[in-house]
Image (tube, grey):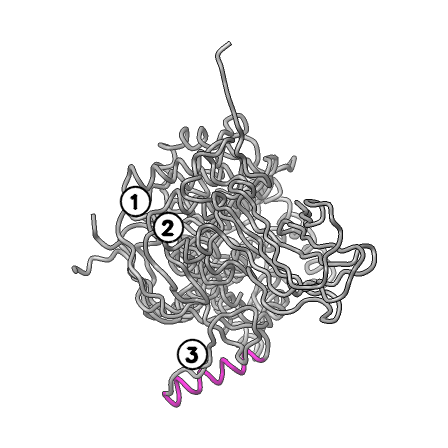
Amino acid sequence: MSEIAIRFDHVGKLYHLGTVGTGTLSHDLNRWWQTKILGHEDPYLKVGEVNDRAHKGNSDFVWALRDITFDVKQGDVVGIIGKNGAGKSTLLKLLSRVTAPTTGEIRVRGRIASLLEVGTGFHSEMTGRENIYMNGAIMGMTRAEITRKLDEIVDFAGVERYIDTPVKRYSSGMTVRLGFAVAAFLEPEILVVDEVLAVGDAEFQKKAIGKMQDVSRGEGRTVLFVSHNMAAVRSLCQRGVLLEDGGVRFMGEVSDTIENYLRDSVVQSSFDGIDGDRSVLFLRKAAILSSDDTICYTSSSLTIRFEVTVVKNIASLVVGFNIKSAFQYPLARADYNNANGCNTLAPGDYVFTFKIPPFTLAEGDYQIDFDVAERNVKRYTTDLSKLSFSVSQGNEAFGNVFADNTPLKKSIIQEKWESTYQRL
Amino acid sequence: MADDWTLVIRPKKRLLDLDLKGLWRYRDLWYMYVRRDIVTLYKQTILGPLWFLIQPVFTTVMYMFVFGGLAKISTDGAPQPLFYLSGIMLWNYFSDSFNVSSNVFTSNAGVFGKVYFPRLVVPLAGLTSNLVKMLIQLLLFVIVYVGYRIAGTQLPLRPALLLFPFLVLLLAFHALSWGLIISSVTSKYRDLKFLVSFGMQLFMYATPIIYPLSAASGRIRTVLELNPLTPVFEAFKYGCLGCGSLSWSGLLYSTVFMCVTLFLSVIVFNRVERNFMDTV
């Protein structure tokens, strides 16, 4: 079973930024002149830059992928992770032959089916049944094959009652479920999945993940799974590939890969400088410390530590911070004053620490806004000292949570209920 | 390690790699596309497939009025309805098929962007569903034709009519190859798209549909004879209407023309197919 199913060999993909217009025509003519007539190398292949979205480059050409080389063994379930724009989707597009690589070669053993987006080719005027055939045919199934599996597909999608109704009357969830159901029964040797699990209700997500696990474990097929959902990647995959700026940054066991990825995902976990007025009141250092090295798991205890210098006497002092969700929604507020009743501090340097116990914050992204101020007069801290951090589902916590073990729920509160039950 | 890869994805493939095997494997998709085209076209209509007939009937009546009545263009002795109907039927097949093939990339970008299958399936299915449409119109033509014969009009049935399947094939592949070339070019540069839609209208008048070839003479006739579709239309009318002409050299010219453009279109299509998603 250690045969190689997919081999990426120095694969690269060059994209042209901007719009297609007369500039493109002159580039095309220039390229044709240089390569075909003068016999030079393609001039635009050299100028391509590393794909870093945030910085404006000098070139209109960008390598979405560059020099990708790795092997995937048969039967492996590989999670491909990385930030937005790291090249994950491009990689899958090349593999599913939607577009061709600019350089390099991909060798594949076995039939590939991709779930880049489910429900491809659905025609809203056709009935569910007709669309199953259409969609299946697009994915490479024969009509006989589909007929054989029709009942299973309909059952899996849970749309039996609507099967002879045009798809335009379906709810969006039903459409997606139907699409996924067709794809799930494809039986290819290699399955390429791109974040399809984010749709559908909890019950369906569970079904879908179960199906993917069957596919990989029971039937020994190779799966490439792209997702931003670390919990889903962790539970489904054995191996991981971390992409960054179009290159492979790390490859290995899935937990190591995720750890590598998370270490980077903190935007500003510490602040070292001066935020405020040097002659009155300012914040000097701030950091979020986790009991698990630099990664914040739901099971870690987090410490928020910051230093404040009071220069002048202030009658009513505020020292505290707000915890906000990634969407700027205020979640919690902490104040030094509340805790001990005093409302001022003599001039000097102070260190504050606040400890958040384990299982307080659920998986997600958070921000901390410091509030060092003279009450009702002036706030001295600014956005400069704003900290962000991400909390990830820990390995040990997975499956122990209360609601159910779908790894896709996104709640604000981490469930750690004290529960009892007794027989009546 | 043994080189038993089932698939090697490379930046470029050979010029004439048609992947006929792949096409054959996807024959069910071809069937589904044809079915979809026919079934969905007139869904939620009351008259349904009758619309396939209404359009040529009204066009014929219009032509009879404008070209036959007002402009008094000769139909070379053939009854006007039959003359126009035959031309409209064949021309519609050609222009519909051309439209399908010339829009392969732009109108299917959504599907092509997500799944791979031999792209040629789509235009080939378009040719087929248009063929079904044309056969329905042919039925109408036959009914009118029989009506005229019963009414006593002298209409010859010549053995040249046996060429009909071949004539349709010629039209289909002309449409396919021109359309593929256009679609390959317009996937990146849209300029041609504007030219094509009215170019097609003009081209209709350069084909003997509303007039017989015999009405033209001199230089104009030479130009018309350079049109590779001319012998196709003429041969059909010769076969069943008694007008027109059967020109073997013309048909040979048309066939050779078709083979050359088909060859070119396959090369161009193959090149564009690989990367069109990045430029469409």
Q: Residue furthest left?
A: B2
The x and y percentages for residue A179 are 48, 40
Which residue bears the numbered disc 3?
Answer: A45
Near mark 2 (Cα within 10 A), the count class, few <14, some 14-19 or many ≥20, is some
Q: Main secondary structure of the magenta part?
A: helix
Secondary structure beneath label 1: loop
Q: Is residue B271 above or below residue A389?
A: below
Mark 2 is on which residue type? Ser
Mark 1 is on which residue type? Arg
Instruction: Please check the rendered image and state whether residue A28 is part of the magenta-colored stretch, yes or no.
Output: yes
Left/right of residue A379 with respect to residue B45 in the rendered view? right
Q: For residue B66, which quarter of the picture?
A: bottom right
Letter of the chain that mark 3 sits on in the rendering:
A
Which residue bears the numbered disc 1?
Answer: A221
Near mark 3 (Cα within 10 A), the count class, few <14, some 14-19 or many ≥20, is some
Q: Which range is magenta?
A: A23-39
- Identity of the residue drawn at 28% across and 46% down: A75
Question: Which one is nearer the viewer's eye here, A160 or B199?
Answer: A160
State how far apart marks 2 and 3 are (Cα): 36 Å
- Counting residues from the N terminus, which is met first, the one under dot 1 or under dot 2? 1
The image's mark for residue A255 is 2
Left/right of residue A14 with respect to residue A332 in the rendered view? left
Q: Residue furthest top?
A: A424
Q: Is residue A417 above or below residue B241?
A: above
- Identity of the residue drawn at 36% across and 71% down: A103
- Counting residues from the N terminus, which is met first, the one under dot 3 or under dot 1? 3
Letter of the chain that mark 1 sits on in the rendering:
A
Asked if the residues shown at circle 2 and circle 3 are in contact, with their CB atoms under 8 angstroms apart, the answer is no
